[in-house]
Image (cartoon, coloured by chain):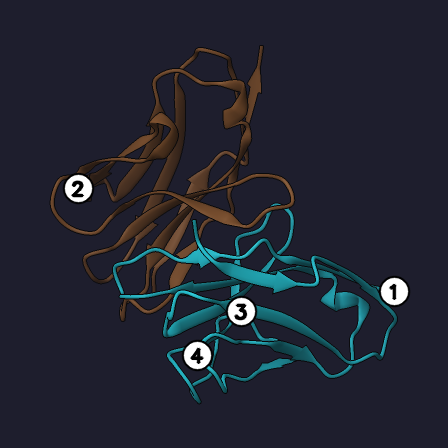
Amino acid sequence: AQSVTQLGSHVSVSEGALVLLRCNYSSSVPPYLFWYVQYPNQGLQLLLKYTTGATLVKGINGFEAEFKKSETSFHLTKPSAHMSDAAEYFCAVSDQGYSTLTFGKGTMLLVSP
Amino acid sequence: EADIYQTPRYLVIGTGKKITLECSQTMGHDKMYWYQQDPGMELHLIHYSYGVNSTEKGDLSSESTVSRIRTEHFPLTLESARPSHTSQYLCASRGQDSSPLHFGNGTRLTVT
């Protein structure tokens, strides 16, 4: 069965600093991987996804993530944090039949001025 | 922008009441999903559907039921609400298997 581990329930950065949110997964098949962002009182919004091809994927709002098969990781990064990036971020992996997604517990990103 | 709608946004209801959470999407997606979300926890899949007249139970045991009579509509029903049902319920849909889930804004349910 597939699973997702997000290290750190909360990550704090200063405005302008590098953002790094960690995600490790397990999957019995080549995975489809996703990062979602959730702002307060809203649903989840897709940031980026990896299915096949280039292992470095770029998403919205300046975020990117790199699929590393040898490390079973899909960490999310952004070079310079902005106050508006404060939100909860979820990593997800597809199931064996590619019909459902398994989500991590989420990481709350806090950005201080 | 995804066109998936959930109503109501907030609901406070007494124990024992029957409730239906509505979810509709206008994208023509075949696959639809219900997730339960609690603070600090991963999203738990409680029901999903591959298309009309298809419903499947998810990973999390749930006392709720769903129906899929029309492609665009995937309501979730609790026959007898209990305080343990207090949570946020997120509806989602997707097209092809490699495509992402599109989420609604959720229904926050409180059972007193």
Q: Nearer the viewer, residue B88 or B83?
A: B88
Query: Which residue is drawn at the image coordinates 81% and 67% (left, top)?
Result: B83
Pinpoint the chain carrying mark 1. B
Which SS class for mark 4?
loop
Of tags 4 and 2, the one toward the viewer is: 4
Of tags 3 and 1, the one toward the viewer is: 3
Residue on which the image places disc 4: B71
Marks 4 and 3, how far apart at CA: 9 Å
Residue on which the image places disc 2: A70
In the rendered image, the vertical position of residue A67 relative to residue B46, given as above or below: above
Pinpoint the chain carrying mark 4. B
Sequence-wise first label, 4 or 3: 3
Pinpoint the chain carrying mark 3. B
Marks 4 and 2, how far apart at CA: 40 Å
Circles 3 and 2 on the same subunit: no
Q: Colour of chain A?
A: brown
Residue on which the image places disc 3: B24
Sequence-wise first label, 4 or 1: 4
Name the quadrant of the C terminus of chain B: bottom right
In the rendered image, the vertical position of residue B40 relative to residue A97, given as above or below: above
Amino acid type of the residue tagged 1 in the rendering: Thr
Q: Residues within 10 Å of mark 4 (few under 14, many from 20)?
A: many
Pinpoint the chain carrying mark 2. A
Residue on which the image places disc 1: B112
Circles 4 and 3 on the same subunit: yes
Amino acid type of the residue tagged 3 in the rendering: Ser
